[in-house]
Image (spheres, rainbow, N blue to C red):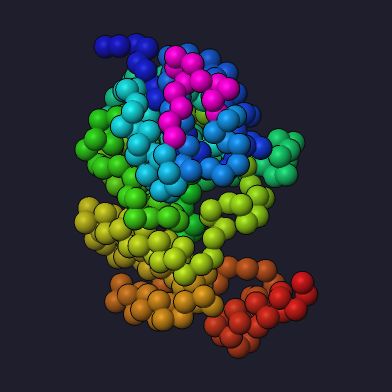
Amino acid sequence: MNLNPLVSIIIPLYNTEKYLAEAIESVLCQSYQNIEVIIVNDGSTDNSLGVARTYEKENVKIFDQPNRGASAARNYGFLQSKGAYVKFFDADDLMNPEMIAAQMNLALRNPEAIISGKWGRFYNNDLGTFKLNSENCWRDMNPIDWICESWKNAQPMTQPGIFLIPRKIIDGAGQWDEHLTLNDDMEFFTKNILKAKCICFSESSILYYRSGLGNIALSAAKSKKAFESNYLSIKLSSSYLLKETNTDLTRRLVANLLQGFVYECYLVNKSLSKKVEIEIALLGGSNYKLPGGKVLSFLSKTVGWKSAKTIHSFLRKSSI
């Protein structure tokens, strides 16, 4: 058995020149040295490509393509990579120096496992604001139990940089769905996690997730197209889980995910919301309550959640 296999770290790049150098440095400073870094510039309009090229060397390869989306960039990077293990890493995030070594230590002892790690957010480009976001799935689990635990509060987190994946699992489960522009990570990791023998948790591996980027962040998109992508991702991910285990529990988890989507989507696309509400009823209904602060909670109890969302949105716009 190869005790020092190559790890491919694939970075899709789009307009993150301010943060890219720090992200690359965190990868190159890994204590595990047998890595290759594949950076795919996805039609950036700033100087992201220029920054990336200052790091180009034998084990840091730079590719450039017209803008096709992060999923397409990740797939292209995967095709160019050679590692037995793969990590997809965003161009504005950071990892601790021991992340790959700690995950590889587990991977070598569990060759059919996906290795997860810890994560937390930091804000305003200040690591002093970093705080771990502890989850109940931060432990060794079988794939179905991991997904059920992750989906339990209808807010699953599958940020790509958390996971180290054996290449053979991706070859079997499938690459990134290039039709998806938002929440593409949920679809990708659901199908890959379900192909793993287990999910092993690495205590010493930490992803620093840069947050607070406002409209720059794709995850903040609120357009109809973005909501349609999010819905499709939830539907595909749910179909993968329900194909493996269709129970009262998994149907309720799916219904709650869809209910969370409806809460977000209602003011932007009411026709899609109505369609999804029918699907929720067919699944047996949801018990997921409207998230939000005290004002939204009070309004929801008083006038119903739909009117509450409408009033709350009006109040927020009026205060701007």
Q: Is residue 98 visible?
A: no
State the image coordinates of residue 205 (x, y, percent, origin top left): 52, 28
Compared to 261, does 121 lie above or below?
Answer: above
Q: Count numbered badges in the picture.
A: 0
The single residue placed furthest to the bottom in the displayed view is 303
Residue at image coords 40%, 51%: 184
Camera-side residue of 17 and 221:
17
Q: Which residues are magenta?
A: 52-64
Q: Residue at x 60, y 29 (%)?
A: 51
Residue 173 x, y percent position in the rendering: 25, 42
Looking at the image, residue 129 sits to the left or right of residue 258; the answer is right
Q: Residue at x 37, y 18 (%)?
A: 6
84 relative position to 57: left or right: left
Looking at the picture, does residue 233 appear above or below residue 201? Answer: below
Quadrant in which residue 52 is drawn? top right
Q: Is 217 one of the magenta-colored residues?
A: no
Q: Residue 227, how many percent across, how many down?
A: 45, 66
Quarter of the image with the C terminus is bottom right
Q: Is residue 238 above or below residue 102?
A: below
Which picture quadrant has residue 233? bottom left
Residue at 37% across / 75% down in the picture? 276
Quick one: which residue is furthest to the right in this view?
Answer: 319
Q: Is residue 56 magenta?
A: yes
The picture places residue 157, in percent across and down from the top left corner, at: 48, 49
- Residue 226 visible in the current orientation: yes
Please identify the quadrant where the N terminus is shown. top left
